[in-house]
Image: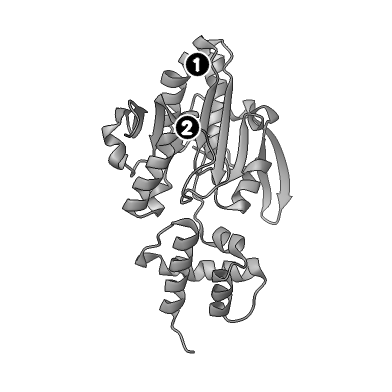
């Protein structure tokens, strides 16, 4: 049966939504074409693309499909004002009380965000002169980026603006230089003390429920991931996350995201920074 390129793109969009809840708009067609090539490579498949998509629909190569079509744009201390708020407003209370702080990063990608959270904890301990008992759970749906995050090795440029002035990367990374075809590149590897604070897990935000306890977290980072979902699904995800945030806990959202129906249950304390005031009835 003959089919068009648009038929293939529509099939990809339908599959991606059914498996992840992610919605791809019509202006993503060029990206889809590029990712189809990536999918074929990941599956070691050289046949008809529609045959591959039909096979995925039957439950085969689902991980390869998800890994091929998810977007993983991130960097260290993205929207760094959130980490300043974490350091200056949230963490001192836990340093003073000795209570453990449990944090969740809902879209860890290649790990820069949860490692930035961990570095912020260590910087707060340095500034306050007190220990902070902290743990971070970081999840993503893409198994490839989670493995990258667990490895904790990143390319680094001396001209990089990723790290704010109050962070010294040499305190948190081991540095090495390797040769490649274009000359030399600097690699930095996360210190073990940062790694010990974080556990990485595979999780789908569109799942009906999440494997966490009610009110488990004091802090939830859910930044720059909701934009890949429809407005209705964004609202559903936020409500599910909210069940796991303690009263008085902080929710950080991305710069173009909003709390949807949660607006009635939170207090805004900064730029896309929200404190939970009451449970959803």
Using the image, tell me which numbered label, if any, was put on residue 41: none
| Residue at the extreme bottom | 1
> Regarding mark 1 in the picture, which secondary structure is present there?
helix
CA neighbours of label 2 inside 10 A, class few (<14), some (14 to 19), many (20+): few
What residue is pinned by disc 2?
A: 214
Q: Are marks 2 and 1 in contact (CB under 8 Å)?
A: no
Q: Is residue 240 above or below residue 193?
A: below
Would residue 81 be seen by someone viewing this image from the given angle? no
**Which residue appears at 46% of the width and 51% of the height?**
206
Please state the horizontal and vertical placement of residue 191, each as a whole percent of the image.
68, 31
Q: Is residue 31 above or below residue 184?
A: below
Is disc 2 placed on a helix, strand or loop?
A: loop
Rounded to the nearest angstrom, the CA distance separating label 2 from label 1 is: 20 Å
Give the camera-side residue of 177 and 203: 203
Q: Which of the image's four quarters has the C terminus?
A: top left
The residue tagged 1 is: 94
Query: Nearest the camera: 166 or 234?
Result: 234
Q: Residue at x 44, y 67 (%)?
A: 13
Residue 50: x and y in percent read 53, 79
Vertically, is 127 above or below 240? above
Q: Does 271 sit left or right of 78 as displayed?
A: left
Q: Is residue 42 visible?
A: yes
Task: Tell which circle, 2 or 1, labels the residue nearer the N-terminal end.
Answer: 1
In this view, the mark in front (2 or 1): 2
Q: Nearer the viewer, residue 102 or 223?
A: 102
Q: Position of residue 173 (x, y in %)?
A: 65, 32
Q: Residues within 10 Å of mark 1 (few under 14, many from 20)?
A: some
């Amino acid at each position: 049966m003959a089919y068009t390129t648009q038929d293939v793109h529509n099939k990809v969009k339908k599959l991606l939504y059914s498996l992840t809840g992610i919605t791809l708009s019509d202006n993503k067609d060029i990206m889809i074409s590029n990712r189809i090539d990536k999918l074929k490579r990941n599956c070691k498949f050289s046949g008809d693309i529609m045959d591959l998509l039909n096979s995925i629909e039957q439950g085969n190569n689902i991980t390869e499909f998800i890994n091929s079509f998810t977007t993983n744009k991130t960097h260290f201390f993205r929207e760094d004002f959130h980490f300043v708020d974490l350091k200056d407003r949230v963490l001192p209370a836990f340093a003073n009380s000795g209570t453990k702080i449990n944090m969740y990063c809902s879209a860890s990608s290649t790990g820069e965000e949860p490692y930035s959270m961990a570095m912020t904890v260590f910087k707060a301990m340095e500034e306050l002169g007190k220990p902070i008992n902290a743990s971070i759970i970081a999840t993503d749906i893409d198994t490839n980026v989670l493995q990258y995050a667990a490895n904790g090795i990143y390319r680094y440029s001396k001209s990089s603006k990723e790290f704010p002035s109050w962070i010294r990367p040499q305190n948190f990374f081991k540095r090495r230089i390797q040769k490649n075809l274009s000359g030399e590149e600097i690699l930095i590897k996360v210190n073990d003390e940062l790694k010990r604070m974080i556990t990485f897990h595979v999780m789908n935000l569109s799942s009906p429920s999440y494997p966490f306890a009610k009110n488990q977290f004091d802090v939830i980072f859910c930044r720059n991931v909701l934009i890949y979902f429809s407005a209705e699904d964004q609202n559903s995800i936020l409500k599910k996350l909210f069940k796991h945030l303690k009263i008085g806990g902080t929710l950080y959202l991305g710069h173009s995201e909003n709390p949807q129906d949660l607006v009635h249950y939170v207090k805004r304390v900064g730029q896309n920074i929200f404190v939970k005031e009451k449970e959803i009835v």
